[in-house]
Image: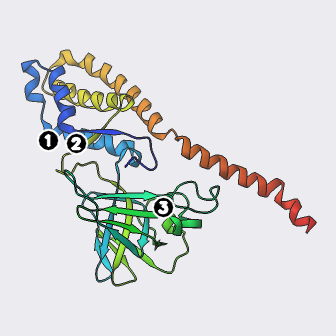
Amino acid sequence: MSSLYNYTLKYRTFNELLNEMYVEFQSPSMDKTIEPQHLIKVAMRVNYDLGLRVQRTRETVLDINNSKAKLPLNFSTLNFALLCGSYTVTTPVIQGTQSEDIIVNQGNCGNETDCNAPYTCLNDCGGYVQLIQHFKTETRTYSQNFPLRLSESKEVSCSCPNVKVHASNTGYIRDGFLFVDFEVGSVYINYQSTMEDDDGNLLVPDHPLLNEYYEYALKQRLVENRVLLGDKESVGVLQLLEQRLRASRNNALSFVNTPNFAELKKIWEMNRATMYDKYYNMFKSYRQ
């Protein structure tokens, strides 16, 4: 599923990124300065510097038992959550390799202007969001979904609608678990995952405007190691790389922090509503 808050990104493993460094530094004198356990810290720092917008968006349905559920190991920050109600089951014809999949559809909200996407209309018409869960042997279509109010924490995104929604069911996230005020049930969560694949390998985004930042960060560390080992001829190269590193970092942060079309549209709608209340709605109240 494409990311909710950022542009669609592709990813590659740290080993794939490191292989490019091996190609560029094939000199035998560089072999002793290339240590994956040292360079992986550089890639992790760049991931952290670029922030949550480069992280992969994932989703799953948690089974609540004894008022709690274990969050996925790759869980980082919650985008939004839905309490799953009743559902119908259909048995599809199994062809080829099947895997679990989750689809969130918009559903019929009645007023399309009030519900542009399931991610942004949870406050007003969250009950119309349709959740479809595909398994190997069956497909569950949830006909009812309810809002779930969550307490603020570092694991919950600042833009998460579950923090401000009015709901009868509440919960909170702590120590890798979701705690709720009911005994059993199912909760759908959409979250930003840690930069790891299913095998635990470190992931980095693969985009032309971001790749240079990672590559120059690794090159800077490699040449810095050469200077620390006594290679004075590499001092000039290190200064050049640091200049290129600063420029590539600025370009990467500019790209990551640029709002996409959906975010710009939301800002435009908020400004329009504010201007309406400020310059028109006030006269309407006077006439009444």
Left/right placement of residue 250 relative to residue 227 reads right
Rendering coords of residue 104 (x, y %): 42, 58
Q: Kindly report the distance in space between the C-alpha atoms of the residues bearing marks 1 and 2.
A: 7 Å
Label 2 crowding class (10 Å Cα cut-off): few <14, some 14-19, many 20+? few
Instruction: Tell me the number on the disc at residue 41.
Output: 2
Amino acid bearing label 3: Cys
Closest to the camera, between mark 1 and mark 3, is: 3
Residue at image point 48% right, 40% down: 257
When the figure is inspected, residue 207 is found, relative to residue 233, above or below; the finding is: below
Q: Nearer the viewer, residue 75 or 224?
A: 75
Identify the residue under disc 1: 37
Instruction: Tell me the number on the disc at residue 281.
Output: none
Left/right placement of residue 77 relative to residue 269 reads left
Q: Kindly report the distance in space between the C-alpha atoms of the residues bearing marks 1 and 3.
A: 35 Å
Amino acid bearing label 1: Gln
Rendering coords of residue 56 (x, y %): 34, 48
When the figure is inspected, residue 88 is found, relative to residue 134, above or below; the finding is: below
Rendering coords of residue 151 (x, y %): 45, 72
Residue at image point 41% right, 46% down: 53
Element assignment for label 1: helix
Color scheme of the displayed model: rainbow
Report the quarter where the C terminus lies: bottom right
Q: Kindly report the distance in space between the C-alpha atoms of the residues bearing marks 3 and 2.
A: 30 Å
Rendering coords of residue 254 (x, y %): 47, 34
Identify the residue under disc 3: 160
**In the rendered structure, which disc, 1 or 3, sits on the residue that comes first in sequence?**
1
**In the rendered structure, which disc, 3 or 2, sits on the residue that comes first in sequence?**
2
Residue at image point 51% right, 61% down: 107
